Image (cartoon, rainbow, N blue to C red):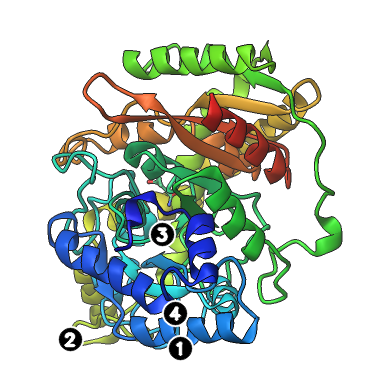
Amino acid sequence: MIKSKDLTITKAHEALKRGDFSCKELAEAYLKTINEKNKELNAYLEVYDDVLTQAEAAQEKFKDGTATILTGIPFALKDNILVKGHIASASSKILGNHVAVYDATVIKELKKHGVVFLGRTNMDEFAMGSSTQTSAYGVTRNPRDVTRVPGGSSGGSAAALASDMTLGALGTETCGSVREPASFCGLVGLKPTYGALSRHGIIAMGNSLDQVSPFGKEVLDVEIIFNALSKHDPEDSTSLPENAREAKSSKALRIGVPWHLFKDGVEEAVMQNFKESIEKLKNAGYEIVNIELPYSKYSLAAYYIIMPAEVSTNLSRFDGIRYGYSAKGETLSDVYKKSRGEGFGPEARRRILLGTYVLSHGYHDAYYNKAVKVREKIKQEVLKAYESVDLIATPTTPMPAFKIGEKMNDPVAMYLCDIFSAPANLAGVPSLALPSGHTEGGLPLSIQFMARHFHEDDLFSVGKKFETL
Ligand code: GLN
């Protein structure tokens, strides 16, 4: 009997090596849980029909000695990652029937390891949202409390992992889309340095911000996935060459806390828990330094201008002609209008409008160009902070998981969920979110750390230490 609840990637690997169970038996155990739980949670939009064949191929690697730590590990994939021959819809109606014609680079890499892909998971449409409620295929429920959202936009992958419907999971981040659901579902989530993991074959939202990002049940799980995927990819012009990646880091012992950012809008339970976490770190020997990040309060404003600008450009390729959904029309322009009008959901349309506006003649200086300048200021001040500290700590989200239906009629309230996520994405630095306790009602709470570019090792080290505190 496989107890998937107790498994981590390392434990599963040891068991596969010892022959306690086979890759096929492991895959079957997860398929069984999916059968039992997915109907209620709606984490998977599709379970692949070749799971057991993949598992058998993985078993061969154990036989011929080419197995790695990821061989045979079941993975859930966010619906915006291309897997050749499978649908990748970004949870949008407009791509509902879009079958990928090639593998994303991260998929190619995982295939080399013999990872077993279980299926694709629900997400906010085109990764726009913080709750997985903007999907065209229904909401995903939080396994910790099914009346609540799992966070977003990678909520399906998070819910799948938190309910033992997978052991490994990939999401993507443009602004917190892995750290937020990790926080709401009691998981670990890593947003890697921009340029560390290839974006080739990922359905783009905001190119200058997007990054494939792993979830794990513990810090070591995300470290294993990150190490397998962090490498230069010539197919992605924003992927950094190996010689531009900094060497491994030293001891990161000084943690900066921008207390001034937490004045408004952070729920009491979150603040209380964060203070306790900082106390624990202090007692464990970390030096806690009060830092000021004056420009960071503008990060949400900058993000919600830069991101829609990039969204409006990226989504212009979905016109009813080249990809996916196509509505009938009298003229070509009719086809464009109807396909886009019917194919995109309200949040995607809102962002296309916003983005088109901030880029339009007469306004791009006032909005887009200004936001780009503010982004640079934020990046500079984060880098400056690293002159006196090694890490920056904040709560991951200002609130724990909220009720399904909440904030859907108030986009600005929804956007405020991203307040602590935005600086890392805007500055391109890595950030790790991990569980830090629970509310009285049992909802997961989370702390996040940011480090210097390519200093993921500092995050893994503080994260693993924090797990023992
Ligand atoms: N909450 C963010 C947004 O709505 C999530 C973006 C992301 O990380 N994909 O834009």
Q: Secondary structure at mark 1?
A: loop
Nearest to the eye among marks 3 and 4: give it. 3
Q: Secondary structure at mark 4?
A: loop
Return the residue at label 4.
83
- In depth, the one of 43 and 353 nearer the eye is 43
Q: CA distance from mark 4 to mark 2?
A: 29 Å
The answer to whether marks 3 and 4 mark residues whose Cβ atoms lie closer than 8 Å is no
Mark closest to the chain's N terminus, 1 or 3:
1
Q: Position of residue 20 (x, y in %)?
A: 44, 68
Q: CA distance from mark 3 to mark 4?
A: 19 Å
Q: Residue at x 56, y 39 (%)?
A: 432
Quadrant including the N terminus: bottom left
Query: Which label number is shown at residue 167?
Result: 3
Q: Position of residue 40 (x, y in %)?
A: 13, 56
- In depth, the one of 105 and 298 nearer the eye is 105
Q: Residue at x 40, y 30 (%)?
A: 397
Q: Mark 4 belongs to which amino acid?
A: Val
Query: Which label number is shown at residue 363?
Result: none
Q: CA distance from mark 1 to mark 4?
A: 8 Å
Identify whether 342 is placed above or below 271: below
Q: Position of residue 413 (x, y in %)?
A: 29, 31
Return the residue at label 1.
101
User: Does residue 232 appear in this view?
Assistant: yes
The answer to whether 88 appears left or right of 463 in the picture is left
Q: Mark 2 belongs to which amino acid?
A: Lys
Return the residue at label 2.
328
Q: Residue at x 17, y 86 (%)?
A: 328
